[in-house]
Amino acid sequence: MWFDDWLGVGALGRLVQFVHISHSDRNVAIFWEQGRWKFDTLSMVLPSKITTRVQQVQVPLVQSGRDTFAWIGEASGCYILSSGVKFLEHASHSTLDAIWRKVWRLEVQVKISFFL
């Protein structure tokens, strides 16, 4: 919840003063119950513009109640090559440089690094 860009405004953890350690590993579904956001369970105050943005989101839960990954470049949430290319074409060079720095610093076996 705090470290992914699920609202399209950046990681929420960067927009609040702090994220309580007990909330650092929580997912979005924990703060959503019976079709409503449970803001009273948060230990920090969200900026009003973020609270408004969060309230606009309806959280669909999959049957297992688990979060799933989705590609933001497609309405379906599924990654396709053309949307990945569009992302790279429109990304700033500084963003791409930061991404590649993270990729090259990954500690993986050499045979796996060929796939990156």
Image (tube, helix red, strand yellow):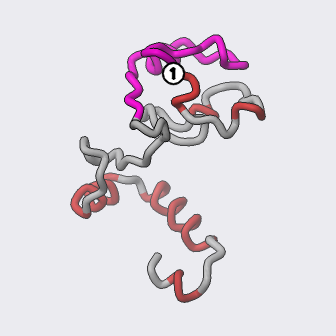
The structure residue drawn at horizontal position 67% and vertical position 40%, both measured from the top left corner, is: 25
Give the image quarter of residue 108. bottom right
> Which residue is more in the foreground, 17 or 24?
24
Task: Reply above or below: 75 against 47.
Answer: below
Check disc 1: other Cα within 10 Å, few if <14, some if 14-19, many if 20+: some
Magenta-drawn segment: 32-61
At which x and y percent is residue 67?
A: 48, 41
Mark 1 belongs to which amino acid?
Trp
Task: Reply above or below: 50 against 113.
Answer: above
Residue sitting farthest toward the bottom: 111
Disc 1: which residue: 32
Residue sitting farthest toward the left: 82
Q: Secondary structure at mark 1?
A: strand
Quarter of the figure that contains the N terminus: top right
> Which residue is more in the foreground, 99 or 109?
109
At which x and y percent is residue 38?
A: 57, 15
The structure residue drawn at horizontal position 64% and vertical position 11%, both measured from the top left corner, is: 40
At which x and y percent is residue 85?
A: 27, 61
> Which residue is more in the foreground, 76 or 86?
76
The structure residue drawn at horizontal position 44% and vertical position 31%, both measured from the top left corner, is: 7
Count numbered badges in the picture. 1
The structure residue drawn at horizontal position 31% and vertical position 52%, both measured from the top left corner, is: 90
Residue sitting farthest toward the front: 63
Is residue 57 within the magenta segment?
A: yes
Give the image quarter of residue 107. bottom right
